[in-house]
Image (cartoon, coloured by chain):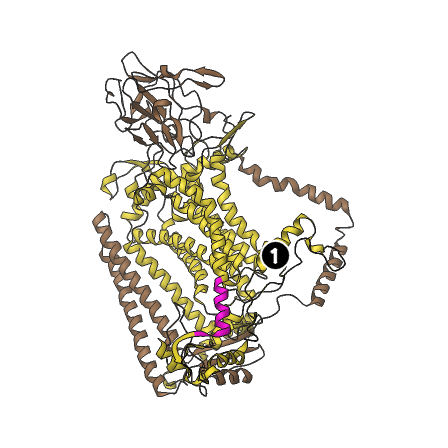
Amino acid sequence: MSEMDETEGTEGAGVPVAPHRVIGTPPPSPRLLGSTAAPREPSAGEVALVSDEEEFEEHLEGLPPDDPQVIVHGKRAEQVVAACFTLAFLAGCGFVAAYVGLGVHTVDKTVRSNLWLGVSLSITLLALGLGVLVWVRHLMPNVEVTQERHDLRSPEEERQATEAYFKEGTANSQFVKRPLVRRTLMLGTLPLLAAPIVLLRDLGPQPGTSLRHTVWSPGRRLLVQGINQPITPAQFSAPGSMITIVPDGYEDDQDALAKAAVILIKFRPGELHIPTRRQGGTLVGTMNWTVDNIVAYSKICTHVGCPVALYEQTTHHILCPCHQSTFDAPTGATVIFGPATRPLPQLPLTTDSQGYLVAQSDFTEPVGPSFWERG
Amino acid sequence: MSRPTDNSDTDFDVSKPLKGTAGWFDDRFGGARGVRTYLLRKVYPDHWTFLLGEIALYSFIILLLTGTFLSFFFVPSTNEVLYHGSYMKLDGIKMSEAYASTLRISFDVRGGLLIRQIHHWAADLFMAALIIHMLRVFFTGAYRKPREVNWLIGILLFSLALIEGLFGYSLPDDQLSGAGLRIFEGVLQGIPIVGTYLAFFLFGGPFPGHDIVPRMYMLHILLIPGILLALITAHIFIMFWQKHTQMPGKGITERNVVGQPSYPYFVAKTSAWFIFIFGALALLATFAQINPVWLYGPYTPVAISSASQPDFYLGILEGALRMMPAWEWNFLGHTITFSVLIPFALPLTIILGGAAFWPFFERWATGDKSYHHVNDRPRNAPVRTGIGMAAVVFYGVLWVEGANDVVADFLQIPLYTVTWISRVLVIVGPIVAYFITKRVCLGLQRKDREELLHGYETGIIRQLPHGEFIEVHKPVNEDKRAVLEAKKVHALMPGPGAEDPNGVPAPSSRGMLGRARALANRAFAESIPVEADGHGNGHGPEGAGEEHAAVGSAGGSPAQLPSGDSSDEDAGSS
């Protein structure tokens, strides 16, 4: 302890100030209650206070507490702290008042209530924090303490004693000696360990083939999303437009729509060139799935299932806003950029006796993201 | 501890309640000594970077408080209701009870909007603080022995917090969070063999179903916070037991802790810090709108808005999904979608797995098995700092790519170009960052050596009697010297294929692994030695003084500055 003081004392006199200050550290201001950056009085600088059995060294920095400068400074700091706490009290009262006095239930009132509640709460908290901070920094003496670290590793003899005791206990338990007991114990607990997994089985149904089908079926009408009205090819005659379609009877069924949502695009004559593609081993000419240059694709992205909601009329590109998979609409929604690996499935279209657009059948391949069993 | 006070007559006498209440407890539990030694007097070192972990801790506490309030009003159900609340724009719209109750919290519960926004801001602050805290621990080497376990707990905390955040902001069932859930479900489906079942069991059937919101709610308010709380307790207890690391400095050794005692200093400071963080979050919640779910509308799988982004901490996954080129295999009737699997698994595995693996790799490569309580300055560990910067760049590229549409719009360059740039950068960037950082670190080490050997430039020009001008250098002060001298250099292990004088290969460098280890060791040991070459003993205060005397005394000038007049010299230079 005394050795520490000595070194501190001799160096304290002439410690050259560092060439530059680290950002965020306090400037070498004349802090009365001491700061490590400020030059210190060598004689009164360190006061030995406590040193006891816990190898605990403490020294106080700055001027002694009975110095007149310190007393004046302390008085002023005390006033600042008290002002902060008083402000916190007033703002806290304001918070309660704002809660009682300002109602909600409309957007404007909510905005007003949020503003006053928030401002008063913020002021309360920040004033309290500031008060405590000034208190610590200007009223409490600046103490620096040096404490010994204890050895984390146990002494060797302790380790050996523990090991010996554990060995003895293990021997006494007969756990090692009697393999029959040991093995049947393990056998007995094994099914129990599986129980939590078994119990989770009823969390959901087996997938089965549900990912392969949607609610589209032959003759089901296409409804325009939003107005939920069927549509004829003549009503959808402006080339270059795209609308979202939901299946008749499932307009509000989120589970059905998550797979069955469709986009409908109208082309000028001659623009549409859907190539014949191989599907399930057979060649499918999907041009005859279109009606009057109108084509229907699944709206569910084949990447991870976002709705492909953006359509660029000039380039005929369908874009998924989530991860920017880009599909070329005239050529069967083939992927031209992005992480999607497969074209958007095409819904076979036809018209019913009343001239409305209907599905010829369900999609002929699973819609949406890939899955292990998809094949 | 007793201390003289200036006005003892107004003192509040603390001995009464102490004897009463504390005595009552000590009668029953004992522990006066333990409380004094381990709680009241525990020493906390002071450094601004040590506040980062506290930010994380306190935002977690604020999350618990505000979350409890929200749970009084939130209804975790996707049953459809017709909305007739205070937000007129959505009047008469069909929506889930979850969304409707979130609107109710926002517009019909006094203070609800404020608490909701504090909760969301606190979640973002929690994640940000975790990230910066982990960076601090990594770059200063504070994860080294004996703190590896706490480092691993920290990584676990971060991973769980990611899931906690995802579930939390998916709960309101608005259009934006629903799109996030849809992506989450699509990614789950992409996992080979078990993916489809995982998705069906979690969602209780095909997406979206009606089970996911209540299930996420339970996980979000009970299971994951419970585990987080347990892990945080363990994290703090271990930190408490092993004591804090310290930055190098004067009087700091591997055997001591220098700082302020817990009571009253640290307790007061950290309380102020907690209140400040709460205040800052309240201020943000008042003036910075976050997650205005009423603008997004209720979720429907048919619609989406453009420029949809998740909360920032999931940006890396979003970016990885956007960056990945299309790649899918079909074999034996099964599908493996690498364009989903790789973005889902690889970046986080590289960063979190790499972080978990790193302390053990470093130990293996350096052969350093000693305790470390004094932190490294990042420049003094160029390989670690380089790897850390590589990880930062890797994360950063993926994160920015997560908003590639916004970037493309902002910089007015085509979207696909942004993606292509990021595809290149995500591989090239980290490599370049590693080498640049390593060189910068070594350069800074050279500067440190210069400063230690020759002092720093004072800006004072002196003319020597024979006409030569010199700039006066002054030795660095004690504090700085202690910091500079704290650098440790790793001992070199035998090189690859090294042999002893008898031609026997060193056992440690044998085999493939041994050669790899020897190579890694060479990289780790690269350092600028402090006591070097030709400068003789430019070490220690006296040595440095002589050095300057030698420079200055060529013409007998007083270039060696006595330390006494340091203050006015310093004033002249500034």
Q: Quadrant of the C terminus of chain B?
A: bottom left
Q: Horizontally, is B61 left or right of B147 in the view?
A: left
Subunit under mark 1: B
**Image location (x, y in percent) of residue B417:** 37, 39
Q: Position of residue A233 (x, y in %)?
A: 26, 17
Question: For the residue marked with disc 1, what is the amino acid?
Answer: Asn
Q: Quadrant of residue B63?
A: bottom left
Task: Please check the rendered image and state whether residue A82 is part of the magenta-colored stretch, yes or no.
Answer: no
Q: Which residue is mark 1?
A: B521
Question: Could you say whether the residue bearing mark 1 is in a helix, strand or loop?
Answer: helix
Crowd band around label 1 with a 10 angstrom C-alpha radius: few (<14), some (14–19), many (20+): many
Q: Is residue B54 left or right of residue A151?
A: left
Is residue A103 shown to the viewer in this render?
A: no
Q: Residue furthest front?
A: B466
Quarter of image, res A247: top left
Q: Locate residue B451, reporting x and y percent.
A: 48, 71
Q: Is residue A42 above or below residue A214?
A: below
Q: Residue at x 48, y 62 (%)?
A: B443
Q: In percent of the image, x 45 and y 50: which residue is there?
A: B393
Residue B196 lies left or right of residue A249; in this view the side is right
**Between residues A220 and B69, which one lies in front from this camera angle?**
A220
Chain in brown on the image: A
Main SS, magenta region, reads: helix
Colour of chain B, in one word, is yellow
Residue occupying the far top of the picture? A353
Q: Is residue B84 left or right of residue B201?
A: left
In the displayed structure, B551 sits above or below A125; it is below
